[in-house]
Amino acid sequence: MSNEKILYKQGRMLIFIYLISAYLMFGPAVEARQDGWISVILGALLSLPLFIMYGKMLSLYPEDNLFQMLHKVFGKVFGKFLSFIYVFHSIVLSSLIIYSITTFINKVGLFNTPQIMICVILGALCIWIIKEGLVVFCDWSQFFIRIIIASVLIFWILLIPVMKFDNLRPCFYYGFKPIYKGAISVLSFPFSEAFLFFSILNSVDDKKNLKKIFIKPLVFSCVFITFATAINIMILGVDNYTIAYYPAYESTKRLELGGIIQRLEIISSIVFIITQFIELSICLICACKGIKEIFNIKDYKIVIFPTTLFCINISLMSFESIMEFTEFNENIWPNYSIFMQVVIPIIIFIFMIVKKNHFSRLN
């Protein structure tokens, strides 16, 4: 049982931030072209039964995090094996996020700054906020979410004059296959990654409503990402949207106020970095809690320093260029992610139900 307690609404808020963070800058479902917004909706619908299952799993073991659940359901040996797999998964995901943030900063702002320096500063900030504890991290995130949402909505309103609705047409021009492929990519990233929240949500104060904790964030994030995708397509056009590494950044560059105030994309860049920082911190917390359970360490915060350094090293060695990173995300990550975040959780859920039913019959 966790000694750190966070509010139920803070748990939902963290899930929402996590789900939208990447698409404040990247473009989802580029394979669907002008139908990318439809892929987002379909991806959310495909995620709904998965999120209902996640909620059910949490309600079965409300006091335990992901790794404690695995030990109780599968026993000490196989439970630790599965815990190791998800620690590895969290570290891989953390490394990808570090690469994503540092490359973005390097490409759009600090051109001549060595990427390792950006990694070190980012890592130091993550270590600091995680050391302060989950309560401080949630309060900090809750403060910034209001600023983030307000900034994005203001940008969308100011960009209305440069939006062209015709860029969204014709719908279903390339058939259903690209839309479905885009939906699977959205399911794999970011929706199914909500499984990592099993390492945090045992700290939520309201255990009775854990079944429903994923639903509202899914709905609101679906609406948010759908609007963001459609707006980026309307502003950039289909061809520019599909080839741009950072469509949202390119969209905000079109914003001018009276020909005087320009270069407001710096604000959207800050918003993106803050949300990605929150996403990275969640993944690192998950990895550290898993290491704590595997090696029976007293406090997960003890291992945050070496874990962060390890993730930084992996991020620096993983990709030669942003093109290689993009190719990995499009061709390799969806299959790997579906297996880790959909297939294995379904198997875990089945074992949970069987074990609970077995014990209820014995009693």
Image (spheres, helix red, strand yellow):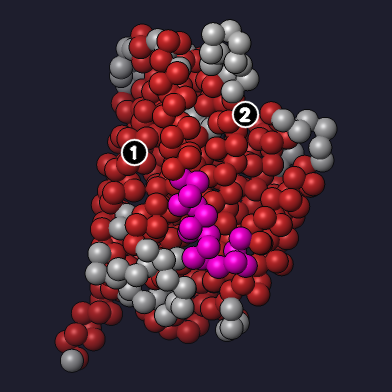
Dominant secondary structure of the residues highlighted in magenta in the image? helix
- Res. 1 in view: yes
Residue 136 falls within the magenta-colored stretch: yes
Q: Locate the C terminus and report the quarter of the image it occupies.
A: bottom left
Please state which of residues 75 and 194 is positioned toward the viewer in this rendering.
194
Residue 35 versus residue 287: which sits nearer the camera?
287
Report the residue at 67% width, 55% height from top. Answer: 125
Q: Nearer the viewer, mark 2 or mark 1?
A: 2
Corner quadrant of residue 129: bottom right
The disc at residue 266 is 2
Residue density around tag 2, few if under 14, some if 14–19, many if 20 or more, within 10 Å: some
The residue positioned 45% from the left and 77% from the top of the image is 2
Residue bounds of the magenta highlight: 129-145
Residue identifier under label 1: 222
Magenta stretch holds residue 348 = no
- Identified by mark 1, the residue type is Cys
Gap between marks 2 and 1 measured at Cα:
25 Å
Residue shown at the point (51%, 40%) measured from the top left: 22
The quarter of the picture where residue 283 lies is: bottom right
SS class, disc 2? helix
Which is more toward the observer, 269 or 335?
269
Mark earlier in primary sequence (2, 1): 1
* Amino acid found under the numbered disc labelled 2: Ile
Q: Is residue 53 left or right of residue 75?
A: left
Q: Which residue is found at the position 66% from the left and 35% from the top?
A: 104
Residue 91 lies left or right of residue 56; in this view the side is right
